[in-house]
C-alpha cells in the first residue's frame, strides 16, 4: 500500500454527517505487472489517466465526494490541463511571475482549491496494489450503500505473473531469450460487486479495437458481473464516442460528432458521461 489507511478513514469521517452525500471511487491510469521481485522491468497497460482525471473534475462539480485511486504519476484532476506550465512561466525584473497562453489557469486553480476538501488522492502502481487496495477502499465505503458509485476507468491488466513465479533479481539479458508465462488475472470487478459493495452503483469500461465484438462483450460483462453500467468505447474513437450498455435496455450512444453536439465545440465527452451517470445514479439511490 502506497498510502496511509488513516487518510481514508479521516476523509470518510469528515463527511459522515451528510446523510445525503454521494461518493464516487474513481480508478484511473494503468496497472503494471512486475517481471521481477526486485523489479526493474514491467508490463504496462496503456493509459495516461486522462478519462479518470477529467471525470473526477466533473463528479466534483456535480456534488460528489471523490476518492481518486490513481496510478502514481498519472494525470490528476485540474493539473493535467497544464502539462508544460513551467515552460510558460515568465519572471520580470520585480520577480513577479506571469503565465503565457493559459487563459483558464486561474479558473482551474480556483476549482482545485474549492474542492480540495472533497477529494482524496490515493496512488497505486502494480496490479496487486490495485486489486488489494481497491477492495480495501470499497470495504471502507460500503456504508454508503446505494449512495456509493464505483467508476472503474483504470486500464487493468488481464494477465499477470504470480508472485511465487517471479525471479528474485533483475533478469539478465546474457542468459538469452526470455519466455514469459502469464496467468489470467483475478477479476477484481466480480469481487467488488459480489463481496464488497453489492448495493453500490458500479460503472465499468470496455475498450476494444474490433468494433464487431464491442457491444457483445459489454453485454456479456453486464450479465456475468451483475453491475449497473458498462461504457463501451473503441480505442481510436474513445474521446469522441462511447455507448452506455445496461441490462434489458437498448444501447445509449454519446457521439460528439453527431448533429446534437455540433454547436458544443469545447464540450468534453466526460462531461456528458458524468451527467448521465448522475441521473441514473440518482434514480437508483433515490438521493
Image (cartoon, helix red, strand yellow):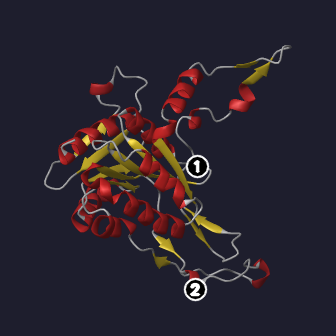
Question: In terms of image quadrants, where is residue 140?
Answer: bottom left
Which residue is the site of mark 1? Answer: 74
N-terminal label among 1 and 2 = 1
- Residues at marks 1 and 2, CA–CA distance in whole angstroms: 28 Å
Number of numbered discs visible in the structure rendering? 2
Residue 235 appears in the figure: no
Residue 220 in the image: x percent, y percent? 25, 64
Local SS, label 2: helix
Local SS, label 1: loop
Residue depicted at 70% across the width and 75% down the height: 38
Which residue is the site of mark 2? Answer: 164
The residue lying furthest to the left in this view is 248
| Quarter of the figure that contains the C terminus | top left
Residue 167 located left or right of residue 279: right
The answer to which of 38 and 287 lies nearer the viewer is 287
The answer to which of 168 and 93 lies nearer the viewer is 93
Give the answer, above or below, for where 182 lies relative to 271.
below
Residue 34 in the image: x percent, y percent? 61, 71
The residue lying furthest to the right in this view is 93
Give the answer, above or below, for where 34 lies relative to 209.
below
Give the answer, above or below, for where 108 lies relative to 33.
above
The answer to which of 247 and 121 lies nearer the viewer is 121
Q: Crowdedness of circle 1 by 10 Å Cα count: few (<14), some, many (20+)?
A: some
Residue depicted at 54% across the width and 34% down the height: 78
Residue 250 located left or right of residue 118: left
Residue 13 located left or right of residue 143: right
Residue depicted at 49% across the width and 39% down the height: 117
Residue 237 in the image: x percent, y percent? 41, 43
Residue 11 appears in the figure: yes
Residue 18, numbered circle: none
Give the answer, above or below, for where 35 lies relative to 47.
below
| Quarter of the figure that contains the N terminus | bottom right
Amino acid at each position: 500500500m502506497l498510502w496511509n489507511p488513516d487518510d481514508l478513514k479521516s476523509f470518510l469521517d469528515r463527511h459522515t454527517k451528510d446523510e445525503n452525500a454521494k461518493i464516487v471511487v474513481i480508478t484511473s491510469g494503468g496497472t503494471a505487472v512486475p517481471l521481477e521481485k526486485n523489479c526493474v522491468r514491467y508490463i504496462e497497460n496503456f493509459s495516461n489517466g486522462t478519462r479518470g482525471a477529467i471525470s473526477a473534475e466533473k463528479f466534483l462539480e456535480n456534488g460528489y465526494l471523490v476518492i481518486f485511486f490513481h496510478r502514481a504519476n498519472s494525470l490528476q484532476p485540474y493539473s493535467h490541463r497544464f502539462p508544460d506550465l513551467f515552460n510558460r512561466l515568465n519572471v520580470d525584473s520585480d520577480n513577479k511571475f506571469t503565465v503565457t497562453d493559459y487563459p483558464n489557469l486561474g479558473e482551474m486553480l480556483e476549482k482545485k482549491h474549492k474542492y480540495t476538501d472533497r477529494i482524496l488522492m490515493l496512488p497505486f502502481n502494480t496490479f496487486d496494489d490495485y486489486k488489494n487496495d481497491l477492495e480495501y477502499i470499497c470495504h471502507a465505503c460500503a456504508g454508503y450503500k446505494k449512495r456509493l458509485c464505483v467508476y472503474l476507468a483504470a486500464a487493468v491488466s488481464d494477465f499477470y505473473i504470480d508472485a511465487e513465479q517471479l525471479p528474485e533479481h533483475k533478469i539478465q539479458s546474457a542468459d538469452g531469450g526470455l519466455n514469459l508465462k502469464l496467468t489470467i488475472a483475478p477479476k477484481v470487478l466480480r469481487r467488488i460487486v459480489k463481496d464488497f459493495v453489492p448495493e453500490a452503483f458500479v460503472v465499468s469500461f470496455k475498450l476494444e479495437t474490433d468494433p464487431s465484438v464491442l457491444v457483445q462483450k459489454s453485454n456479456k460483462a453486464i450479465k456475468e458481473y451483475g453491475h449497473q453500467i458498462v461504457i463501451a468505447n473503441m480505442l481510436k474513437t474513445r474521446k469522441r464516442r462511447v455507448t452506455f450498455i445496461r441490462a434489458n435496455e437498448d444501447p445509449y450512444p454519446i457521439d460528439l460528432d453527431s448533429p446534437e453536439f455540433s454547436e458544443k465545440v469545447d464540450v468534453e465527452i466526460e462531461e456528458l458521461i458524468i451527467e448521465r451517470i448522475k441521473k441514473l445514479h440518482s434514480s437508483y439511490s433515490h438521493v
